Image: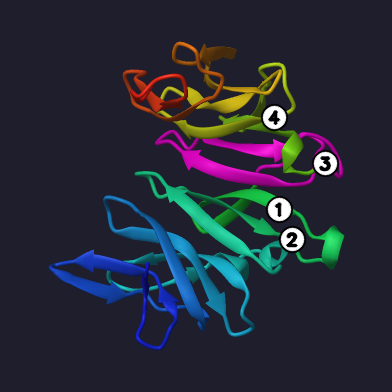
Amino acid sequence: FASTGDGFTRGFLYTGGSLLDLGTLGGEDSFAYRVSDSGIIVGRAQDMTGRFHAFVTTITGGTIELAALDPHMAGDFGTAVAINSLGDVIGYYTTAGEHMSARNRVFRYRDFQVEDLGTFGGEDGVAVAVNDRGSVAGYFSSEPHADYAQHRSFLFSSGTLVAIGSLGGQLTTARDLNNRDDVVGDGDVGDGEHHAFLFSGGRLRDLGTLSGGKQSSAYAINERGDIVGFSDGSNRSA
């Protein structure tokens, strides 16, 4: 995204040597976050009331406001955060409601249908990544009325919501997944330490830290299972 001459922020597409303004949903600002190999772009944009809603658009034009497909998405905020090669779009939105009754819900958009991925009893969720199988990684608050200081990661795969669990502390945060449904992220282990994790084959593994460290995080994983992130305790990246 980029700032315009009148002070607004607009999502853009760079193609053919030029920047193309993606416009809005009737408001002032928009943000584009991902583009697929087929040219489908996802993000969030303001409508005429100033509310941000998730959108899907293409290089040749034709924008879909996802809130128009599902009335539950007509709250104050919504965003699409990622898209896979098949066109599955994921994100999260605030349900229509007043003050504390409004909650973040995780969705997957496929074939002009919006699917709510549910929760584990908590009320808020965030989606972070989708793979080419349509599996989704993210995190939920762990119980009703809990804040994000008590969130736990999840994997949604083949129609099933799987709890990733914890490393012994109050939270885990998923960051990425590959096409084998391996999920990486980070979580509390207790005693003020925070470690990178790998969730693979139904098992959660603490990846530890570099020598002498107490904090680490895993941010990406490829199809071979190589993981990158960072850790304290050394001048080298983990």
- Where is mark 1, residue-wise? 104
How many angstroms separate mark 1 from mark 2 (CA)? 6 Å
Q: What residue type is labelled 3?
A: Ala
In x, y percent, where is residue 114? Answer: 60, 55
- Where is mark 3, residue-wise? 146
- Where is mark 2, residue-wise? 95
State whether residue 188 is above or below residue 89.
above
For marks 2 and 4 on the same chain, the one whose residue lies earlier in the sequence: 2
In x, y percent, where is residue 201? Answer: 53, 13
The span shown in magenta is: 117-146
Q: In which quarter of the image is the C terminus?
A: top left
Q: What residue type is labelled 1?
A: Asn
Q: Is mark 4 on a helix, strand or loop?
A: loop
Res 233 visible: yes
Q: In this view, does 13 lie to the left or right of 130?
A: left
Is label 1 in contact with label 2 (beta carbons under 8 Å)?
yes
Label 4 neighbourhood size at 10 Å, few (<14), some (14-19), many (20+)? many
How many angstroms separate mark 3 from mark 1 (CA)? 12 Å
